[in-house]
Amino acid sequence: MTRIDLSDPAAIRRENAAWPWRIVFLAYAVLLVIATHWPGSGQPGEGLDSPDKLMHFLCFGGFALLLWMTGWFRRFWAASLIALAFTILAEATQSLLSVNREASGLDIAAGILGVMTASAWMSTFGTREHLIVRQQELRSRFILDELMGSPTNWILIGAAFGIPTVFVSLTIYLLAWNVAALSIGNIALTIGLATGAMIGAGMVLRLVAPYRERVERDHPCFDCGESLREVALDDLGNGTCPSCGHAVHASQWTTLSSSNASMQQLLNCDGPVGLVCLVFYLIIAVVIGPIALLMSGHAGLASAILYTGIGVSLAMIWQWRRTRRRTSLERSGEQCARCRADLTDIECIGGIGTCPNCRTEFARHATVEGDGDAAFDAVKND
Ligand SMILES: [Zn+2]
Ligand SMILES: [Zn+2]
């Protein structure tokens, strides 16, 4: 658990930003306990394709993600371990505490897969120490905190995701059942979720626009939220927030472009063995695993495995993208992100410069010649 220092404005801002997540997490956890212990009907639907396993996957995965967002843990694996324990406990107590419900190994397996997938995503969060990279990544986090600080936004995003998900899933399920006597619970829920996720993402994009604009206008400190419009920055765009003392850089209020460093370079990091492992993982998690389970009559678990395969792969691609962006931003003052022109000799007043070739903006926070590391060490003091 993290401790808060009440004299530190940055800690107070983080604490305030965490509260909405904590309330939502606690309400979610209570609902999840009620839902998993609700008395069952006593008759397992024979021959019905119930999306029960998929629900376990999503609900416990969601539990892990929300627990991480509460900011109660410094390390993501601590939140993962607690979510795992909760998943096992919630299932194990079912047969003890409620009527007509049996603990099911397959339910636990689906829940654990959900927590694993959520953990793959949680492992990709976190920021770098390099000042320009850190500030670019903190800006996204700052905008997210501002967005989710409003209860209205929670309701709008929740409704934009939840209503289409339920409506589309039920419509498809009932239609298939009444017209063709087919029970396609997992497919119906998957299409419903995809629709809900798209409409929910559209809502987020709509709502986030004014918060982005406010960052460009008010020049806030991303650590404590204080406006830094009046704070003077040095020739290289470096400064210190007078309120919380964190380092700031002139480039943090604009989105810097990053180059498309080739996929080849990233794949080279793990070598050919890494690539082979990845391909094997994808084949097993997305093709062989689900098909094998489907053949043996475990349609629910097959969808949970498929979701895990896709979810973890997407987390890996996301991590690649971040690494590419970080590598490119770290070289921002030396090489143009777009045309790769050498920028070492290009003047950069106030920390932001423009490539003479293609007019792309770049940022520099320390002198490139020789002593860049000393200036870099001076700012990574938190
Ligand atoms: Zn500050
Ligand atoms: Zn250029």
Image: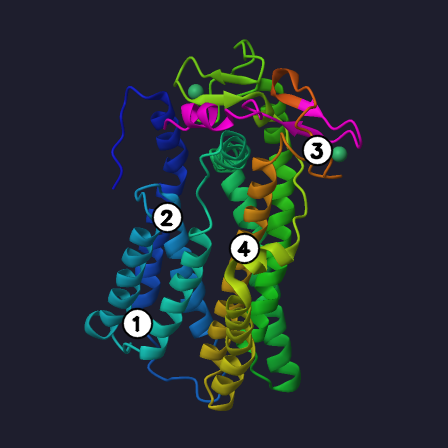
Pointer 4: what residue?
162
Dividing the picture into quadrants, the one containing residue 127 is: top left
Dividing the picture into quadrants, the one containing residue 344 is: top right
Per the image, label 1 sits on a secondary structure element best described as loop
Say which label, 2 or 4, has the lower sequence index: 2
Are the two marked residues, 3 and 2, in contact with CB atoms closer than 8 angstroms?
no
- What distance separates the C-alpha of mark 3 from that of mark 1? 68 Å
Residue neighbourhood size for the residue with mark 3, other residues' Cα within 10 Å, grouped as few (<14), some (14–19), many (≥20): few
Which numbered marker is on residue 68? 2
Residue type pointed to by label 2: Trp
The quadrant in which the N terminus is found is: top left
Say which label, 1 or 4, has the lower sequence index: 1
Which numbered marker is on residue 39? 1
Pointer 3: what residue?
342
- What distance separates the C-alpha of mark 4 from that of mark 3? 50 Å
Mark 3 vs mark 1: in front: 3
- Provide the residue span drawn in magenta: 353-382
Say which label, 3 or 1, has the lower sequence index: 1
- What distance separates the C-alpha of mark 2 from that of mark 4? 21 Å
Residue neighbourhood size for the residue with mark 4, other residues' Cα within 10 Å, grouped as few (<14), some (14–19), many (≥20): some
- What distance separates the C-alpha of mark 1 from that of mark 2? 30 Å
